[in-house]
Image (tube, rainbow, N blue to C red):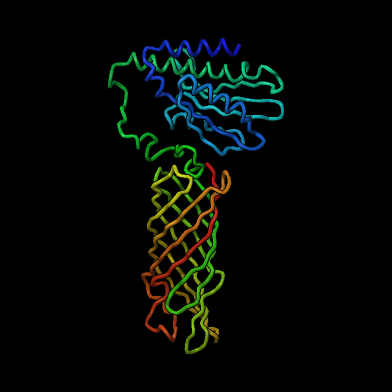
Amino acid sequence: MRSLLLALLTGLWLSLPSRAAAEQQSVVVVSTIGPKAWAAAQARLTAELRLVGLEIIEIGGRRDVDHELARHASAFHAIASLQVLRDGDAGLIRVWLERGEDEAGGYRHVRVNLRNTEVVSQAVLPVVELVYARSVQRASRRRAQPPHQGVVVNTDPKKKYGAPVVGPPIRYHVRSEMRYAVRAGFGPWFSGAQTTPAISFSGGLRAHWFQYWSLQPELFAHAFRHQSDTLRGVLQLNAFGGRVHALLEPWPRSNVSLGIGPGVGLLWVTTADPFGQATLRSSPLLSARAEIASALAPFVDVLFMVSVGYATAELPSGSLLASGQQMMRPSMDTMLAADWHWQ
């Protein structure tokens, strides 16, 4: 059975008048990990699709049913997207197909008992045949369409994935696929003006709406106070506030993501002297950040960040050794953080 199906598919493939048109067509494969994975069937399905000349675009890191197969196919201009799942002895191949000439598009499901010895012929090869038939229909439509009518020719390979993009659809890298993330981190903050360092805790978001840019708003507070030696004794200084950075990520498809960019924020500094007198001052904050991020788990990244800031208003520290200097002019903080992603 398998040999017959493969022979038919290969014969159809070789008989196409324009093989180059089919070679440009792609299929998105969503890889599932954990107990829902059916890795052997996915590998076989991917190999069979490549055998008939279709390009495979893999998206990894899913742990359960991905309800965005249609969006993945649209983002990559693919004829189909699919996901292979397993639940006990049951295997399931979920397929989304674009609309054909005489057939409706949408979802198809092939369910099979994994203990059956005919798994390949009952599940994998029928899906390959279905997807391949749709690729033949698309190739026929392209040949029948007059040149440059209704077809946008993209001569810039950098624009293949679009900018801005929906997703964004970047291959193989979970961080770039996910649009949002929750962030938590901590690290030392150096304020200058002869004050001691403090430990800052931060929580925020990461919004990846564009292919090469991310927006990162956050709130921060210094859990351990800065100290400054003054005429009246040791002055306790604490800081809290918020800031937002826009980071350029020039290599979004890399396993290790780098980012750099400017930011703005608002800072409040409280001071308390040994006699109980307290003051509160605020200042706008200009900032710049550089970060490096790497995947720790399918939906978790670990990051190391270095930020420098400059307070535009005067924030005196009262230090005897630096009486003319102002706090946060400049300041620097480093932070170890983790991002938890979702789509």
74 relative to 152 in the view: left or right: right
Q: How far from the left and from the top, in percent, is residue 155? A: 30, 31
Note whether 136 is above or below 26 in the view shown. Answer: above
Quarter of the image holding residue 100? top left
- The N terminus, quarter of image: top right
Depth check, front residue: 294 or 222: 294
Residue in the picture at 54% in, 44% down: 342
Quarter of the image holding residue 161? top left
Note whether 39 is above or below 182 in the view shown. Answer: above
Depth check, front residue: 90 or 316: 90
Q: How far from the left and from the top, in percent, is residue 60? A: 54, 37
250 relative to 66 in the view: left or right: left
Q: How far from the left and from the top, in percent, is residue 103? A: 48, 14
Residue in the picture at 54% in, 32% down: 30
Residue in the picture at 56% in, 39% down: 61
Q: How many marks?
A: 0
Note whether 313 is above or below 231 in the view shown. Answer: above
Q: How far from the left and from the top, in percent, is residue 81? A: 51, 27
Check the image and name the residue furthest to the bottom.
231
Residue in the picture at 56% in, 69% down: 223
